[in-house]
Image: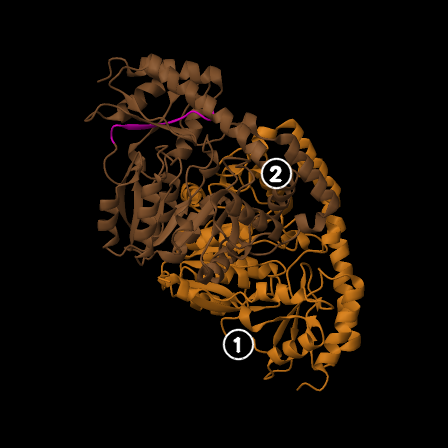
Chain colours: A brown, B orange
Amino acid sequence: MRYSKRTDDIIDSFIMKLISVSKEKGMISFATGLPDGRLFDTEGIAKAAADVLHDNPKEVLQYSTLKGITPLREKIAARCRTEMNFNVSAENILITNGSQECFDLIGKMFLDKGDGMVVDDPGYLGALQSFSLYGPKFIGVPMNEDGPDTAKLAEALKQHPKLYYSIPNHQNPSGFSYSLEKRKEVAEMISGSDCMMAEDDAYGELGYDGRIGPPVRSMADNVILTGSYSKIISPGMRIGWMIVPDEMVEMTMKCIESSSLHANSFSQCIMDRFLENLDFNKYIKGLRKEYKRKRDLMLDLLDDHLPPELTWNRPSGGMFIWLRTPEGTDAMRFFDSALKNKIVVMPGRPFHVNGGENTIRLNFATANDEDIKEGVKRLAKAYDGLF
Amino acid sequence: MRYSKRTDDIIDSFIMKLISVSKEKGMISFATGLPDGRLFDTEGIAKAAADVLHDNPKEVLQYSTLKGITPLREKIAARCRTEMNFNVSAENILITNGSQECFDLIGKMFLDKGDGMVVDDPGYLGALQSFSLYGPKFIGVPMNEDGPDTAKLAEALKQHPKLYYSIPNHQNPSGFSYSLEKRKEVAEMISGSDCMMAEDDAYGELGYDGRIGPPVRSMADNVILTGSYSKIISPGMRIGWMIVPDEMVEMTMKCIESSSLHANSFSQCIMDRFLENLDFNKYIKGLRKEYKRKRDLMLDLLDDHLPPELTWNRPSGGMFIWLRTPEGTDAMRFFDSALKNKIVVMPGRPFHVNGGENTIRLNFATANDEDIKEGVKRLAKAYDGLF
């Protein structure tokens, strides 16, 4: 095949392979990023679907506008105002096929082969894969429990990277979040640079005690803020969005048109109606409570079953716990041994630009209580005597 | 903005601008490529939505598989077998967010800046826009009433282009179709070349007297066949597909994952259930009959109202009539005058690599009978005394 040169640069996401492994009989999985399907409001969505198809079928089924439907963009803008204290116009919001499409669009718009691009280290693999097709030189900045190593970020920015991609809230894969100080510091550094930040807020609504801090976007203008309903309402509906600076609106529209014409209007209309009928704050409170409960369940079990040389964090939101095997050990061996014990975890190495050999990502959101209990026991067994 | 170099190459699609103009009060539009919303089977889709959300909500709302859901891919494969006499496995079929995403994926996989790419001249603008971001050198091959000028195609293939993009059935914009001889000739030429053909079959089901001929794909292996439910069931649901050679399956999966993770599973499950309940042949017969009736209505009106120096074709399917103003005249002036008379048409020039100044695309599928009647009268008035 006479493929393009850019195909040489695609990094392997590893994720889809794990999804197939996870489906094997008797397997328990802590590996993916799936929300808990038991929390979907199926009835609410079914009602919304029936209602819009009854009231307005032609809008739902026909081609739609490039930016996405206006009432949905207005709801996203309103939520930014009330929840993030961030004033944005619906004019700057564009609906996409999940946030994955945002990453592709951002890469397409900004990256030429060899351009510098700063990323969290570890960082979200799905986004890194998307950007990798556009051939950037990734510059990893260590992501710590309170956010990025800002001294390293300052150094990285000196190389005039085109983009800085980061998840400030309950990061995938680590569960780490920026402190307020780091948010301010990063905002100041980005404002003073020629680098565009891509701020991924996929997990922002899932702060267990509410939103954990303001978006960097609210303190700096050269930031694209991306969001998604995938983690809180339904990933299958594939609705994400990007909030872009004024001067980017037209170029983003062109690139959306070129990539997919426009996001799924069928999903958008149903989502918009669903939100119309929803007490959002009450709904999100329920999700937060349940995910917090499952986090606590897994944390308690890890405490009970794993030996003290393994360490992990206590995330304030999201879906992931970041586990470390002792310095110098190779967690891939833990991963392999876990597989043999019918428990799938996600190795941390692929999320890293540098290092990360002794890390593992655990998802506590997807599995049910019974599987979480059994899975942690299997993990303990898999680890026993390994190093 | 420090945009990528590829953004310099995007061609303007013109289409979205026309859609906004078309929405102005009192405007009649023959400009877009929208199917007739009155033909949507709203009830059938609403029932399918209610049923799958009742029976299988987690599959509908959760993340799904990268290739698209299996039963839908099997239905597409089955239809290829019965309707196209073309034996394909569901394993080679990947679902996308409309066929527009196929074009982006194909460009991404194959095109480096400066690579040769053969296209119909005129060719489908939306696809050309999508490919343009990957910087190919477009080589136009004249599209005639019976298909491409094969002498010119042979010449073009000598330049070792990476891709050949073409619509053999009821082409957008011209309504032209390949004759059987041309299909065979093109298949032979492509088979003997190192060029991959991207065969776009968006309108194949809309042959008024049935499918007009076998796909080139059935006679040549190095062909990607793309299709879509947008023109026959619902564009808002954004379901397209690509059928790729065995050796391309894995790379296509990687690129889909990187671009959008996977196509909308919500839409896919509903579409699959809708098709499950549908007598497809009866349904498609109804569509064909109605579009044929509208074609005839517009053709008769053009005969009655337009002067003899304007010429046009009689398409055997699809949605478009291709109109020519006299050689040497500039149809953009006709377009402008039409706009002033509150009738929007699509100028043919943007669809061309070379020439096409005296061409106009007319869509007879979208407007209702009354608007078709009034619109043609306005066209006649707009043309009167222009050249």
Q: Residues within 10 Å of mark 1 (few under 14, many from 20)?
A: few
- In the image as oriented, which residue stretches furthest toward the left? A328
Q: Position of residue A78 (x, y in %)?
A: 56, 47
Residue A283 image-quadrant placement: top right
Q: Say if B162 sits above or below B77 in the image.
A: below
Q: Position of residue B188 (x, y in %)?
A: 48, 57
- Host chain of mark 1: B
Q: Do the residues labelled 1 and 2 touch (CB within 8 Å)?
A: no
Q: Do labels 1 and 2 share a chain?
A: yes
Q: Say if A301 sits above or below A264 in the image.
A: above
Amino acid carrying label 2: it is Lys
Q: Where is residue B211 in the image (x, y as percent from the top left)?
A: 66, 52
The residue lying at 70 percent from left, 82 percent from top is B309
Per the rendered image, the range of residues in magenta is A357-366
State left or right for residue B77 relative to residue A349: right
- Host chain of mark 2: B
Of the pair A142 and A235, the residue shown nearer to us: A142
Q: Say if A380 sits above or below B89 in the image.
A: above
State the mark number for residue B355.
1
The quarter in which the N terminus of chain B is drawn is bottom left
Give yes or no for residue A361 being in the magenta stretch: yes
State the mark number for residue B75.
2
The residue lying at 49 percent from left, 30 percent from top is A35
* Element on which disc 1 rests: loop
Q: How far is disc 1 from disc 2 in space, using C-alphas?
A: 41 Å
Specify which label sits upstream in the sequence, 1 or 2.
2
Note whether residue A147 is visible. Answer: yes
